Image: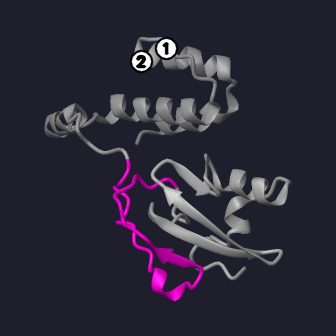
Amino acid sequence: MSANLAQEIANLPRQNVAQLRKRFEELFGETTNANNKAWLIKRIAWRLQALAEGGLSERARLRAAQLANEADLRLSPPKPPRSRDTADDPTISSAAAAPWTEVDGRLPLPGTILTRLYKGHQLQITILEQGFAFEGKVYGSLSAVAKAITGSHCNGFHFFRLLKTGSSR
């Protein structure tokens, strides 16, 4: 890298955002709405180096274009299969194992019956495909069921003791 190029790149952090945006326009031939100084510095420094020393090879450009055109790429990896061993937990009995879209890892599969002793009463809540059944009514969340039972708002996962795996509470 030449001394002039190194000096110009070293001076970039001393410039304000308006100056950096102007320099960006000079180098790239287009305006930018970016106001992030660090981003502007990185882009300008890259462009200065690419102009002085050469950019990507034609092979690298073609490969990048090929990768960018593959529209069926996943943005996130698939979730691991859901498995919950209900044999170790005496408060959960599995009535059925229906396929269900995983909403929260703390929830057992639909058809599972949660039991809880509360103020001397044995409570049973059935997990449905869409909601939770308790005493003939369907609720949208465990917190709604807990509120119907206690009369005040509380976290349904804590009330029914469905804490994250590995939690000691």
Secondary structure of the residue carrying tag 1 is: helix
Image quarter hosting the C terminus: bottom right
State the residue at coordinates (65%, 57%).
Answer: 135
- The x and y percentages for residue 35 are 63, 24
Secondary structure of the residue carrying tag 2 is: helix
Quarter location, residue 161? bottom right
Q: Residues within 10 Å of mark 1 (few under 14, many from 20)?
A: some
In this image, 98 relative to 93: left or right? left
Quarter location, residue 117? bottom right
- The residue beneath circle 1 is 25
Which amino acid does the dot numbered 1 rest on?
Answer: Glu
Residue numbers of the magenta segment: 76-103
In this image, 16 relative to 33: left or right? right
Q: Main secondary structure of the magenta part?
A: loop
- The x and y percentages for residue 69 are 20, 31
- The x and y percentages for residue 38 are 60, 36
Instruction: Confirm or deny contact between disc 1 and disc 2 (CB under 8 A).
Output: yes
Which amino acid does the dot numbered 2 rest on?
Answer: Phe
- The residue beneath circle 2 is 28
Question: How many labels sit on residues?
Answer: 2
